[in-house]
């Protein structure tokens, strides 16, 4: 729980704290950055009546993590300070007024459904890598979540790579065709608490989305804006189809990447006669040439990629047997896996004319 409750610093001092509300045998911990809101409820023994205070989030997370495993933690409000003790250890942390803590107003849910923790974790793992580290288009900093045809679908893209995956749902209450964009930051935090057992209740409203896992509730404002039409960029026909082993292919890509240009980290792949030839070059370093076996018996074709994006895309699959579907050297390339038929990835190639002297 320590990592979950750790919050980043903000310009509003009280938001660097957690709100602790203890009453009726339960201690409720609340953290917010005004865009997202996390609530954790744990059993507690109260003496002296209800209490409501705030504590520095980072320091609380750190000291709780250093307490002996399984030990009871006692908090005493001493007016302006809280004494936190466990066995022979004692801290006193300065508090800020609980009345200054922002009040979060939950949105009415138009769509409610449950998904297993394992399924939601797999969705997040499959698509989150495709989010940009930063982008002026705020809508791309989140993943598109949709319910359609009794499926839950999640999509992420940064314009250079795209990943989409779906899982089936048993029942959907309310609007069967919900759609919202949820920040990658919240999904990253949510991913940390998802296990192999249990379910997640998901609520989607006009302005908010919520994810409830046991005693933990994540609630966030959805990101407004028009999400790109991803279907429009996914080719439907592929003259060139390659089947490859992910681990062999990744190793060859890493070897080629050693001498790739820093600017675009490009490597060139030439498919022919059941093999893939890897070449790369950097003017101030040198060249590389290597080859791996693949399943391909079509006409020869060359295509170039950023090798790091290629590796990230391959790693998003849970199985090493990958299909590489190529329309042309300049069209988006589609990656699939027989073991995960509901997972599709798209990777934009680099123009070969940009990599060769004279644009040849």
Image (tube, rainbow, N blue to C red):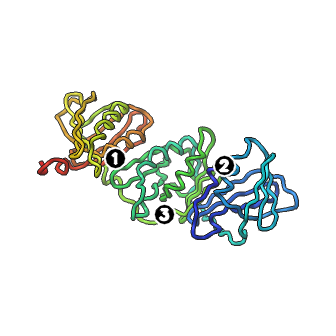
Residue 236 in view, yes or no = no
Q: Which mark is residue 223?
A: 3
Which residue is nearer to you in this view: 291 or 156? 291
Tag in front: 1 or 2:
2
Q: Which residue is mark 1?
A: 346
For marks 1 and 3, give the CA distance. Answer: 23 Å
Q: Which image quarter: residue 301?
A: top left
Q: Residue at x 80, y 67 (%)?
A: 79
Q: Which residue is mark 2?
A: 1
Q: Is residue 258 above or below residue 186?
A: above
- Using a 10 Å C-alpha cutoff, classify the residue at mark 1 as few (fewer than 14 neighbours), some (14 to 19) or many (20 or more): many
Is label 1 in contact with label 3 (beta carbons under 8 Å)? no
Residue 68 in view, yes or no = yes
Q: Is residue 79 left or right of residue 229?
A: right
Q: Is residue 140 above or below residue 312?
A: below
Secondary structure beneath disc 2? loop
């Amino acid at each position: 729980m320590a990592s979950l409750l750790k919050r980043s610093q903000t310009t509003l001092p009280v938001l660097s704290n957690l709100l602790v509300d203890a009453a009726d045998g339960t201690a409720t911990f609340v953290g917010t950055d005004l865009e997202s809101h996390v609530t954790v409820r744990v059993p507690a023994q109260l003496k002296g009546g209800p209490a409501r205070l705030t504590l520095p989030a980072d320091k609380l997370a750190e000291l709780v993590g250093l307490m002996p495993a399984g030990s009871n933690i006692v908090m005493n409000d001493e007016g302006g300070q809280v004494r936190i003790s466990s066995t022979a250890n004692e801290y006193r942390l300065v508090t800020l007024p609980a009345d200054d803590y922002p009040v979060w107003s939950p949105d009415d849910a138009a769509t409610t459904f449950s998904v297993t923790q394992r399924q939601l974790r797999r969705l997040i793992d499959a698509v989150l890598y495709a989010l940009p580290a930063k982008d002026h288009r705020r809508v791309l900093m989140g993943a598109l979540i949709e319910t359609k045809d009794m499926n839950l679908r999640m999509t992420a893209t940064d314009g250079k790579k795209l990943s989409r995956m779906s899982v089936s749902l048993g029942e959907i209450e309310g609007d069967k065709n919900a759609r919202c964009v949820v920040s990658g930051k919240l999904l990253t935090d949510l991913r940390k608490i998802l296990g192999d057992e249990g379910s997640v209740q998901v609520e989607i409203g006009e302005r908010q989305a919520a994810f409830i896992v046991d005693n933990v509730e994540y609630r966030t404002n959805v990101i407004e804006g028009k999400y790109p039409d991803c279907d429009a960029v996914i080719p439907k026909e592929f003259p060139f189809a390659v089947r490859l082993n992910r681990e062999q292919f990744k190793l060859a890509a890493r070897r080629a990447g050693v001498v790739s240009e820093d600017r675009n980290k490009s490597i060139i792949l030439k498919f022919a006669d059941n093999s893939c030839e890897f070449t790369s070059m950097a003017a101030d370093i040198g060249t590389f040439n290597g080859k791996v076996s693949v399943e391909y018996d079509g006409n020869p074709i060359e295509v170039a990629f950023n090798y790091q994006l290629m590796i990230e895309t391959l790693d998003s699959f849970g199985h090493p047997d990958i299909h590489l579907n190529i329309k042309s050297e300049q069209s988006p390339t589609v990656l699939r896996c027989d073991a995960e038929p509901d997972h599709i990835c798209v990777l934009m190639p680099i123009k070969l004319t940009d990599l060769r002297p004279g644009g040849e």
